[in-house]
Amino acid sequence: MRRSVFIAGLATLTLGTLGFGTGQKSYVASAQEKMSTMEVKIDNFSFGPATLTVPVGATVTWTNRDDIPHTVVSTDDSKTFKSKVLDTDEKFSFTFSKVGTYPYFCSIHPKMTGKVIVQ
Amino acid sequence: MHPFDIKTVVLAKHAQHVVLIHFPIALFIIGVLFDFLAQWKKQRLLAAAAYYNLLVAAIATIPVVVTGILAWQWELEGQKLKGILLMHLVMGCLSSVLICVVWLIHMRTRSKQAEFLPGYRLPIEAVAVVIVALTGHLGGFLSGVNGPG
């Protein structure tokens, strides 16, 4: 009797641990997924969202959903990131490895501006 | 950015192209209109007005082409163009050549002191107006004239 209770307890503990582990794995996976799907849409001559806050190491992808070509160019003098001309549905990605604020604009339409805040 | 700030006017890399382009377009279209009217009404005064409009239009294409190419080199770092941008570049160059060709036809007739301009210029002028209009339409589309703000 004692032995069967012990085995049942051990089995519960093992399953529980496995279950917790699986849950933790799925949590980590969803967090990574969330991190990798940081996206800025370019549409109707604007960046959306105009301001994006991301953690360090996140990759931001800009997708041109407009009928017009656009670019994504950081405003700082060293041009931290600079895309080629993006036609409709073309993408540009950049990984932010340092904390800071990164303002950017479209060099074809300088009125189009956006900002990525890396925390 | 203030519209009357001299720094903005002089240094805003490709803004000059967007501003200057309106001069040859307007002068050329009006020049062609005067030429068609001169042909129809048989008036020398209208022909002279056409000539001077076409002359200034041809001169105005020079800074427009230069600023357009500089915008490509500065803002886009001379990268390989495709799509609407490439079409705009090719049609822009073609428009400039046609404007200069039309002016040359008028200039040669004047320098020879011939009484009549050659009739073949009229279809060339009509085609040139269509190409200039299409190039301008593409330019307007690219610059977002119809966009928000």
Image (spheres, coloured by chain):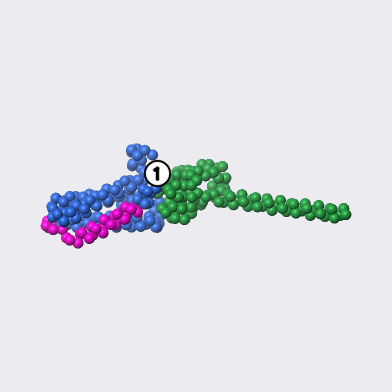
Q: Which residue in the structure is indicated by mark 1?
A: B149
Query: Range of the magenta residues?
Result: B112-139
Counting from the top left corner in percent of width and height, residue A29 is at: 63, 52
Question: What residue appears at the point 12 percent right and 56 percent down from the top-left corner?
Answer: B113
Residue A57 appears in view: yes
Residue A40 vs residue B59, the one in the foreground: A40
Given residues A81 and A60, the one toward you in this image is: A60
Tell me which residue sits at (56%, 48%) in the image: A58
- The quarter of the image holding the N terminus of chain B is top left
Rendered location of residue A81, percent (x, y): 48, 48
Q: Residue at x 84, y 53 (%)?
A: A5
Task: Indicate the colour of chain A.
Answer: green
Q: Residue furthest front?
A: B41
Q: Indicate left or right for A78 with B101 as reference.
A: right
Q: Residue furthest bottom?
A: B120
Tell me if residue B110 is in the magenta stretch.
no
Give the total of numbered labels: 1
Numbered disc 1: secondary structure = loop
**Residue at 35% across / 50% down in the picture?**
B140
Q: Quadrant of residue B109?
A: bottom left
In the image, the chain rendered in blue is B
Magenta residues, dominant SS class: helix
| Depth order, front residue of B56/A13 | A13
Q: What chain is tagged by disc 1?
A: B
Q: Does residue A79 show up?
A: no
